[in-house]
Image (cartoon, coloured by chain):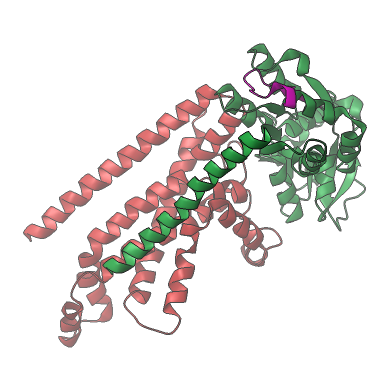
Amino acid sequence: MKNQVFIFLAILILFMLPGCSNDKEASVQKEKKNAVELSIAAAASLQEAVGELQDAFKKEYPQVTITVNFGSSGQLAQQIQQGVPVDIFLSADQKWMNMLEDENLIVKETRKDFTGNKIVLIGEKDSDKDFLTFENLKGDEMGQIAIGDPDSVPAGTYTKEILENLGKWEELKNKFVYGSDVTQVLTYVESGNTDIGFVYSSDALISEKVQVLAEADSSLHTPIIYPAAVLTDSTTQDTANKFIEFLLSEKAQTILAEYGFIK
Amino acid sequence: MDYTPLFLSLKVASIATIIVFILGTFGARAIAREDFFGKSVLEAIILLPLVLPPTVVGFALLYLFGKNGIFGKLLFESTNIQIVFTLFGAILAAIVVAFPLMYQSASAAFQNYDKNIENAAIIMGASKFKVFWTISFPLAWPGLLAGVVLTFARSLGEFGATLMIAGFIPGKTNTIPVEIYFAVQAGNTSTASFWVVILIVLGLVANIWLNWWSKRNLLKYKTD
């Protein structure tokens, strides 16, 4: 028994060792090649697109290693506020970027609107509800509806705005199940637990189990714009600026469009 | 201030604790001391929610007890009870996540005393029912109580699985942990801190009370 415990501990320690040595090697290599590390905090909705953007950027700047941290824009903004070291912030919402700008945490000149999105109404793949539009939703005819929490999930905030402008918010209010992020809203619809849900067009495109029932008229809500900015505390300002320039390039815009983002 | 999260949390934790206590006690008594084929596999399955991330548990529950899930559909058609997006979902999540803790404590408790005491009683003609209530149960009581404390604490703090299956519906399924999460997400620090304090106080009080109560009970039991 005792022997087994020792073996178990020895294995645990073995797992820790390579971690240490690799770090050292990596840092030595870095100094040699003059490599730069870029840390990006990106809104969760960008996850799929950023993976490809990252690859494309690395082709042009092979010396750059990129690490991306995904989360809801609000969560990321608060982490940045608390001093988490990040070079670039890609937000799905102007609100959180404004907050960081007010506190001088981002470099004002680097702030660029690099893409946009749309709100869509989704149902299960073989849903029989394809007659639905934003305008003809009726509270008493609907089951539960999945929506991002309007207080914390931007997609929810925009949806609320749309429904308020259509005068439907109060009527549908007690049908809502609030998701902590758009992915959860997708899961609820995919699994058939709610008939319909509201997500970004980029999210609807990723999932094969849902279909877009209707698109919201963009005049019904504040434009959905994704701003990017370099953070004041970034130690790699030049490279970070290059990445933001890259985001605005035609190549990056094509990639973003493929994933359902439209400027 | 809206206090519904407090009441919802207490409701979920108490109901879940009672159910888990009953299931865990009888389950452990039935399984723990027997040797049968596939026992280790069965116990591994029982303990699975302990090692899985709660979101995974929640995801599985969502698919099993969802509107199109096997159990969810069956339950809805037979009793008209909907699990997803209701307080039932929160209770179910708490039960599944806390059950392994109760089972572990209870199975240790039932193996911790001399089995011959029970055998003696049976030989002397006591019914199985009587043996359980007058011998097994009191002897295992300290261990069972430890399980109850853990179960209550785990149910009170359950978040990941709860959020998946019960969703966030203010006034209906917003237990304290879920309320805290959404308050933090919305940047609503004062609400979040308020509930954090409540949860800490609640957890401390529950633990202290149960510790004190179990000690007093054990003392009484020892002097007998």
The front one of A140 and B75 is B75
Q: Is residue B40 above or below residue A18?
A: below
Q: Quadrant of residue A34?
A: top right
**Residue name at image x 77 percent, y 44 percent:** A48
Residue B191 visible to the viewer: yes
Image x and y of residue B40, in percent: 42, 76
Q: Quadrant of residue A161?
A: top right
**Residue name at image x 77 percent, y 14 percent:** A109
The front one of A123 and A208 is A208
Instruction: Please give left or right for residue A145 compared with residue B56 in the image.
Output: right
Q: Is residue A169 above or below residue B29?
A: above
Is-magenta flag for residue A231?
Answer: yes
Image x and y of residue B49, in percent: 49, 59
**Residue name at image x 52 percent, y 57 percent:** B52
Image x and y of residue B205, in percent: 31, 38
Count of numbered circles in the view: 0
Instruction: Please give left or right for residue B115 compared with residue B21 in the image.
Output: left
Instruction: Please give left or right for residue B110 compared with residue B103 in the image.
Output: left
Residue B172 visible to the viewer: no
Is-magenta flag for residue B140?
Answer: no
Image x and y of residue A174, in percent: 70, 38
Magenta-tinted stretch: A226-239
Q: Is residue A206 above or below residue B137?
A: above
The front one of A115 and B110 is A115
State the quadrant of the C terminus of chain B.
bottom left
The front one of A249 and B51 is A249
Residue furthest front in the image: A32
Any idea which chain is the red one in this picture?
A: B
Q: Quadrant of residue A120?
A: top right
Any idea which chain is the green one in this picture?
A: A
